[in-house]
Amino acid sequence: MLNHIFLIYLSVLIPFMNSIELAELTPSPCGDEHCLYCDYKHLRYCNDCQIAQTTTISGFKHCQTECYANQYGRYNNTSVEECMFCDRACEGCNGPLQVVEEKMGCKRCKVGIYEGEMKKCLHSENSQTICSDNGHKNYYRDTSNSSEKLWTDSICRECHSTCSSCSSYTNDPITCVCKLFKKTDGSTSECSNFCPSDYRKLQIEHEPYQTCIKCPEGYELNVITGKCDKEVSIWSW
């Protein structure tokens, strides 16, 4: 009697155990229709794809019928095309390079710069300081002209020669940090690389440049503020 019960038990248990083992060896239905094999515990993690284009993220594959706009295709060692992400500075690409290049680089830039004859794409978390963040300290971001629009939305341009940094191409101290001198006649100011002999040089506290000043008639220089104040007449009776 006991032997009979034991045999019945085995007849139920063995197929059940085999089904567990088979489930671990056989790919379960995956969340991605193009996935050939996936992690049976996490169906969305694919191990191999039925189609060529794949993107590997955190060690697992994402199957796709074609590479996305921000990706380029390359062949790995098994001759299967893999979709790789473009450099973040690119707007579309044909390869991993950060320059506008037909076969291996960006198709165009969001923000670009000329480095010699090379058109390089730039990236920064802060769009206002993108030029200096990429090592171009005396450059500013500007709107691209009609010919530049073919490869970049905006471009980093070099500041005026009298500026150490700027926000536009001018030597006006409002948008230009003077490199050597801020020349003023008391009413107008401009950055300059020299100070005329009939002007007086002042070093104002906390200013990275020297003030070069000449007060108009009827004004005298305030050496503390670096500004021209009206002369005060003293009458003696």
Image: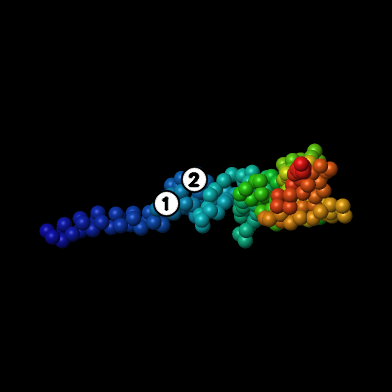
Task: Quickly name the residue at label 1.
Answer: 42
Give whichever of 131, 189 is nearer the camera. Answer: 189
Give whichever of 151, 225 is nearer the camera. Answer: 225
Work out which quarter of the rendered image holds the N terminus and state it: bottom left
Q: Which residue is drawn at 64% across and 43% down?
A: 69
The residue sitting at the right extreme is 197
* Amino acid at pointer 2: Asp
Dot placed on the residue nearer the N-terminal end, 1 or 2: 2
Image coordinates for residue 233, horizontal then vertical, percent: 77, 42
The residue sitting at the top extreme is 146
Give whichever of 90, 17 is nearer the camera. Answer: 90
Structural crowding at the residue carrying mark 1, measured as other residues with C-alpha within 10 Å and reported as few (<14), some (14–19) or many (≥20):
few
Task: Quickly name the residue at label 2.
Answer: 32
In this picture, residue 94 sits left or right of residue 188: left
Image coordinates for residue 2, horizontal then vertical, percent: 13, 60
Q: Residue at x 18, y 59 (%)?
A: 6
Judged by depth in the image, the label closer to the viewer, 1 or 2, is 1
* Amino acid at pointer 1: His
